[in-house]
């Protein structure tokens, strides 16, 4: 709806009041239908006696069948049918003095709200003009009737002037919102324009009731958090209604582009001062807000897609020359040391919601990341490394579960090293998932011997090596329910010190000497031999980590 169309229509409507001929008034009204929109006037009827009679200025499209449909409506508004026209309607030209006639309009498409509004204005003004013409006709018969007709005409003119004033106010609101959009003022510009137009405090909230923008006095501190169930009920109610709804001291309109509620706009009106102009301004501002929020969401989706594509390329080592520029375009500095982080959380689907939770958690720890999802795993290319277990603890709180596992790859500085760090992160994640406990965070740099184990759980060569050097001891322990392999492992871990090993095993030194002697007898190997000692130590370490997983790193890195 443009202001030029509105003012042109109203000006022509004013001209109808100058005619004393009812047929001429109806002809002019029919001529104005095309000004309103793509529709056309099919016929016009005047009330003569008790019957509606077709006006002679109806063109060639009116038929006896149309006359019958109009008679069936008996002076009421209602639909009429036309060949090859999607919409037809008979508007009763009615004023307080009674029925004056009917105006029949059709269109190839159903008219929008703006076109229906303008048709309503035309119908009302036509009925008013016909009423005045009838009053002037009666004036010739009686002077009192003439005075009443002049009073009625003046009242209609006042209503028309009021309509013009309302339209002017609406245009001013529309212009203010358009200027805010052109300047890129966003939500702050919308809420300020609404406050200036109504004189009432205005607020924009997200769908959960969190404040996004405020204009005017009396901003609550802290801003109240609504009950979630009541909030959802309010939004559903407001989305169903064509006009703003009142909720306690506020008038609320929702911003729902394509039917999805993205936010709400409200006027704070505890005194009930909001008039029809304020309601219309709120409605127009809500439409602008819907466009703004839809635009913001689309930008966010585009940025997220660009981030995902960049990370996917980094993980496979593609497009390295342009990586820094692409990262800068999405607000990430790819220079400096980075680590790839892989996250899985049993029982949680790695969807956009989970990935968002991981990103929020990393941001809360001051860790800039580029996120993506690959094969059921949340993957982050992080600038810097998370503190020891801090990411795991924070993410556990965020998702409400401690069942997850996190693997952190080694440091990578140039972008072409990201694939290596990614494979290390997956290796650390695999080790953590196979460890006891299976939850927590593991750094690839802390894996020790695990770093040389093959990925995927294929430890056949390792098992053969362990069997070659520890087979007799393992068989002996199985038959006698003893712990000679554990004793040997602890002995090596303590650097061959009898006292420390005995204390760690909680046994006497003489018991330890006895066990070591039995180990020599069973294996036939001399622990003093450098080659044998090295292979046995590696074998016990392999046996230990394949059974229990990597040792926990020290408290501080």
Image (cartoon, rainbow, N blue to C red):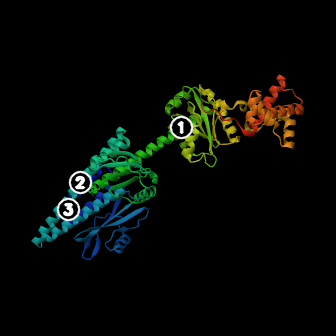
Image spot of residue 499 (x, y percent): 75, 29
Name the residue that disc number 1 marks. Answer: 362
Report which quarter residue 62 is drawn in: bottom left
Q: Is residue 181 left or right of residue 368?
A: left
Query: Element type at marker 3?
Result: helix
Residue at (54, 35) in percent of width and height: 369
Res 458 visible: yes
Q: Nearer the viewer, residue 160 or 535?
A: 535
Name the residue that disc number 2 marks. Answer: 164
Q: Nearer the viewer, residue 165 or 239?
A: 239
Residue at (41, 58) in percent of width and height: 234
Name the residue that disc number 3 marks. Answer: 156
333 vs 371: above or below: above
- Work out whether mark 1 precedes mark 2 in sequence or the reverse, and give the earlier one: 2
State which mark lies toward you, 3 or 1: 1
State which mark lies toward you, 1 or 2: 1
């Amino acid at each position: 709806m443009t202001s030029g169309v509105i003012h042109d229509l109203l000006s022509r409507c004013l001209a109808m009041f100058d005619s004393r001929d009812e047929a001429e008034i109806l002809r002019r009204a029919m001529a104005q239908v095309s000004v309103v929109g793509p529709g056309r006037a099919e016929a016009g009827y005047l009330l003569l006696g008790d019957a509606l009679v077709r006006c002679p200025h109806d063109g060639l499209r009116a038929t006896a069948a149309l006359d019958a449909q109009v008679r069936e409506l008996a002076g009421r508004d209602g639909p009429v049918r036309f060949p090859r026209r999607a919409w037809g309607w008979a508007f009763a030209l009615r004023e307080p003095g009674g029925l004056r006639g009917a105006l029949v309009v059709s269109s190839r498409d159903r008219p929008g709200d703006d076109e229906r509004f303008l048709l309503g204005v035309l119908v009302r003004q036509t009925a008013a003009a016909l009423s005045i013409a009838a009053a002037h006709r009666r004036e010739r018969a009686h002077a009192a009737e003439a005075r009443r007709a002049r009073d009625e005409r003046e009242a209609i003119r006042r209503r028309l002037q009021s309509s013009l004033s309302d339209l002017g106010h609406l245009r001013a609101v529309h212009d203010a919102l358009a200027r805010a959009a052109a300047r890129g003022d966003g939500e702050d510009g919308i809420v300020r324009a609404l406050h200036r137009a109504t004189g009432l405090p205005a607020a924009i909230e997200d769908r959960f009731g969190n404040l996004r923008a405020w204009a005017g006095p009396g901003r609550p501190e802290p801003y109240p958090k609504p009950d979630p169930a009541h909030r959802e009920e309010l939004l559903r109610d407001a989305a169903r209604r064509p006009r703003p709804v009142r909720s306690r001291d506020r008038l609320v309109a929702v911003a729902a582009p394509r039917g999805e509620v993205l936010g709400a706009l409200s006027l704070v009106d505890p005194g009930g001062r909001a008039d029809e102009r304020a309601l219309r301004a709120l409605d127009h501002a809500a439409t602008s807000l819907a466009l703004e929020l839809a635009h913001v969401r689309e930008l966010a989706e585009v940025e997220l897609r660009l981030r995902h594509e960049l990370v996917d390329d980094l993980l496979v080592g593609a497009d390295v020359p342009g990586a820094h520029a692409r990262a800068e375009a999405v607000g990430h500095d790819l220079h400096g040391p980075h680590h790839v982080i892989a996250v899985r959380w049993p029982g949680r689907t790695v969807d956009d919601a989970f990935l968002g939770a991981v990103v929020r958690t990393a941001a809360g720890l001051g860790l800039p990341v580029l996120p993506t999802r690959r094969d059921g795993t949340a993957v982050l290319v992080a600038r810097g490394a998370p503190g020891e277990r801090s990411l795991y603890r924070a993410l556990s709180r965020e998702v409400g579960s401690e069942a997850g596992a996190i693997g952190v790859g080694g440091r990578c500085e140039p972008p072409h090293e990201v694939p290596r760090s990614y494979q290390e992160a997956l290796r650390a994640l695999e080790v953590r998932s196979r460890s006891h406990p299976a939850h927590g965070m593991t750094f690839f740099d802390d894996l020790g011997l695990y770093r040389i184990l093959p990925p995927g759980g294929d430890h056949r060569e390792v098992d053969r090596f362990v069997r070659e050097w520890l087979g007799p001891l393992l068989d002996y322990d199985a038959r006698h329910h003893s712990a000679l392999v554990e004793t040997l492992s602890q002995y090596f871990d303590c650097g061959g010190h009898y006292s420390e090993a005995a204390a760690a095993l909680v046994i006497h030194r003489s018991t330890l000497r006895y066990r070591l002697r039995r180990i020599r007898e069973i294996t036939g190997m001399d622990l003093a031999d450098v080659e044998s000692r090295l292979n046995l130590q590696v074998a016990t370490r392999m046996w230990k980590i394949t059974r229990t997983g990597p040792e926990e790193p020290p408290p501080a890195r």
